Amino acid sequence: MIRTLSLTCSRCGKVFSAQVHLYYQDDFTAQSFKDIKLVCDDCIRAWKEKWQIAHAEFHEENYVLTVTITLKDGTVYKNMDCTPMDDTESVITGEDIPPEAQHALYNYYVTFAQKRESQQIKDCFFTKEEDGKMSADITTVGGERYDKLVFYVEDGYLKTEQDVPDYVMDGLVIAYKSYLAQEEMLSTASQPAPRMPQRKPMPESQWNTGEGYGSGNTTGGFGHRNRNPFGGF
Ligand SMILES: [Zn+2]
């Protein structure tokens, strides 16, 4: 049976004519050829014109990458899940966006990834100060330096005496945890050493108080149990 399909745009409803190809919208619910969602040239042109990216802000948390896109016409798409594709140098988002915009988005992503890389902690050296506090000398991959950054643990959270960016704080927490783990390993291999001055007790829910102090290591009761002393990991 021969049937006809009129070229009607699924977006604007106009009947249009086509030359060498047709645009259509992917639609998994389409059962037959007549259900296909055609899109006219005018709508494609408007779509491409709309997707002029003025700014894109990437954000990564718990390994989930999202992007907030501001278009030149002022439209904002907030916190869209997205996936960068290195082979095609594009970023795929939940929203249908033209290839040119996917590529433009990738350039924003590269800038974001480079910045994130430069904010990684390259070196972190710890010193025990005379008053019992700890200090850290930190250098980031990008060359930022934080010298003699004094910090302490309060209510189960690590705090610094001066304000530092979140990425420095995150790096410091990770570095200090591995420092404590290393200290503990070394101390169990050596003779008992004098114990640390007694700390103010921490809330039991967040901090392991007491039990670890008597074992004769130099770091007191940090992280002896599986309980996470700093929260967040
Ligand atoms: Zn149309």
Image: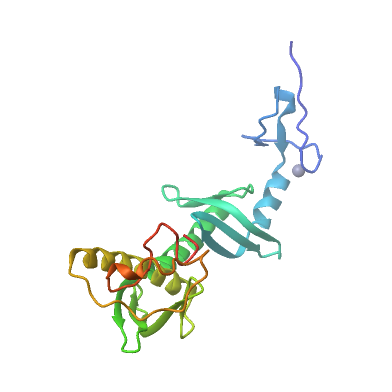
Query: Which quadrant of the figure shows ligand 1?
Result: top right
Work out which residue is located at the far left of the displayed protein and give it: 190
Q: Which of 39 and 190 is in front in this view?
A: 190
Residue 177 in picture, x, y percent from top left: 36, 66
How many badges with numbers are in the image? 0
Q: Can residue 119 be seen in this view?
A: no
Work out which residue is located at the far bottom of the displayed protein and give it: 130
Q: Which of 60 and 76 is in front in this view?
A: 60
Q: Is residue 18 left or right of residue 202?
A: right
Q: Can residue 145 be seen in this view?
A: yes
Q: In this view, does 30 lie to the left or right of 126?
A: right
Q: Which of 53 and 212 is in front in this view?
A: 212
For the point 71% across and 35% down, which residue is it?
A: 38
Residue 71 in picture, x, y percent from top left: 66, 62
Image quarter (top left, top right, bottom left or bottom right) of the N terminus: top right
For the point 70% across and 29% down, which residue is it?
A: 29
Q: In this view, does 37 lie to the left or right of 152?
A: right
Residue 131 in picture, x, y percent from top left: 35, 89
Residue 189 in picture, x, y percent from top left: 19, 64
Eyeballing the image, is 98 above or below 219? above
For the point 46% across and 85% down, which residue is it?
A: 161
Q: In this view, does 50 lie to the left or right of 60?
A: right
Which colour assignment does the render follow? rainbow
Determine which quarter of the picture holds residue 208: bottom left
